[in-house]
Amino acid sequence: SIVSPLLRTGYHFQPPMNWINDPNAPMYYKGWYHLFYQYNPKGAVWGNIVWAHSISRDLINWIALEPAIYPSIPSDQYGCWSGSATMLQDGTPAILYTGINRPDINYQVQVLAFPKNASDPLLREWEKPAAYNPVAAPVGGINATQFRDPTTAWYADGHWRMLVGSVRDTRGMAIVYRSRDFRRWTKAKHPLHSALTGMWECPDFFPVSGPALQDGVDTSDAGAKYVLKNSLDLTRYDYYTIGSYDKRKDRYYPDNPNGDYHRLRYDYGNFYASKTFYDPAKRRRVLLGWANESDSVPDDKAKGWAGIHAIPRKIWLDPSGKQLLQWPIEEVEKLRGKAVTVGGKVVKPGEHFEVTGIATYQADVEVSFEISSLDKAEPFDPAYDNDAQKLCGVKGADVKGGVGPFGLWVLASADLQEKTAVFFRVFKDGYGKPKVLMCTDPTKSSLSPDLYKPTFAGFVDTDISSGKIALRSLVRTD
Ligand code: FRU
């Protein structure tokens, strides 16, 4: 197929062509960042899944290599699904992933792979030792079609432990496996954690160093707190909780007992099946996630690709200890060219101000808004049930409110027929405290009829009492 040079992303990750979904086994090895990903070598729709492989020096500029993991043994002959990398004590990376081993149904087992040649910094070839594979099979009441996406393993008190996502009835869970030698794995009696949320895809479990400490922690090192993230198949979002980990019992306890249902998310936009890794080169934890395609399937086929990975973010614990903070990795700033600066603009209700002079196809935008007064903030209507998305759906970018909407049309056609809004609205909660809603309203982003254009939204837990709020936006156009 012909790959259109147009309509490609600039900031975000994508391979030269074809379908991608989840990021797999991100790691830093001998000077290179490695990213593997769910990939269809034959087209722009999901299917024929292998692990494609790209490498980078800076997590921004990528070189696509040939697929690294593809069906080659009985355990994975019908697909190589998601998984993770672990650095063993001798410095060798190991990969655990889900193999599909039956043609008719998606019957899932966990497979172990090692580099064929660990002295090759590019880690091009992987082998799957027959003596140990599969390392885990769905026995003892595990649903064979809901048993996947092993995590990075961590080491404590003589044992490696890894998690596999699963579900029993509607109880999503992270099943624990233990191993002394990383080759023979035994299922633990109890899951690390579970909740009535439906299937847990792509679990991720990692330590963080402590409130406001931006340094990351290696997955096997002790953290001040722990984070458990799951991708909810039912609603298609990634939620996390912060809590403590009992390594003797291999149990995780969220700090907020309602956390599994309040559902903090990494991202309130199009972001799924994410995974973090510890980057020893910059002592940080980096988050990567998949944004699925907004184009229709015929359009995907015509353009020859579908799906991106959102710009990598550094992630750490907020000073409150109650949520995570994140920011695009600093390397993205190397892409900045000429600066265009405007300041002190007064924008009245119903007006807009156009930033001109950006003679380029991508822009790293930093804007700060100052609201003259929060007095007019509307009382927050409990009928919205704390559902940010519902609220933004009703009060889109063109609905006037007490304070707001204010924000950016990140991209607009000259006649403003097409425009993509990212904006805020401020409400007052029952105690008169400001409550900040952040939305993206893509409903007018294109005149094309058959796009996926859901409104995305979240409440931003930030202090706006000074009337100031800042927004960073990475914009790309062709
Ligand atoms: C998540 C997911 C994983 C699975 C993979 C298959 O998007 O469904 O659970 O391993 O994608 O491509």
Image (spheres, rainbow, N blue to C red):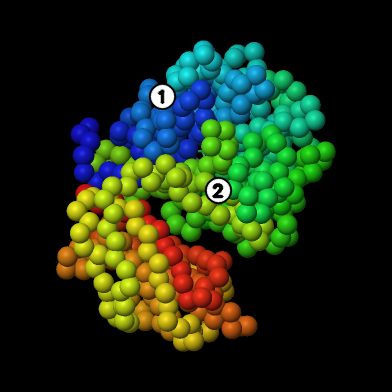
Residue 427: give its label.
none
Q: Amino acid at mark 2?
A: Ile
Q: Secondary structure at mark 2?
A: strand
Q: Depth check: give the residue in front, 49 or 270.
A: 270
Residue 359 seen: yes
Circle count: 2
The mark closer to the camera, 1 or 2, is 2
The residue nearer to you, when weighing 68 against 330, is: 330
Q: Nearer the viewer, residue 242 or 473?
A: 473
At x 61%, y 57%, the residue is 318
3D distance between C-alphas at marks 1 and 2: 28 Å
* Residue that badge 1 annotates: 67
In the picture of the structure, the residue carrying the numbered disc 2 is 315
Residue at the spot 58% in from the left edge and 38% down from the top edge: 283
Q: Check disc 1: other Cα within 10 Å, few if <14, some if 14-19, many if 20+.
A: some
From the viewer's perspective, is residue 142 above or below residue 388?
above
Q: Is residue 393 visible?
A: no
Q: Quadrant of residue 260?
A: bottom right
On the image, the x and y values in percent for residue 139 come to 70, 31
For label 2, the crowd category at 10 Å Cα-Cα, with few meaning under 14, some 14 to 19 and many 20 or more, is many
Q: At label 1, which amino acid type do we have? A: Pro
Percent of width and height locating residue 342:
29, 65
For the view shown, which residue lies furthest in the bottom direction? 376
Q: Position of residue 456 (x, y in %)?
A: 43, 62
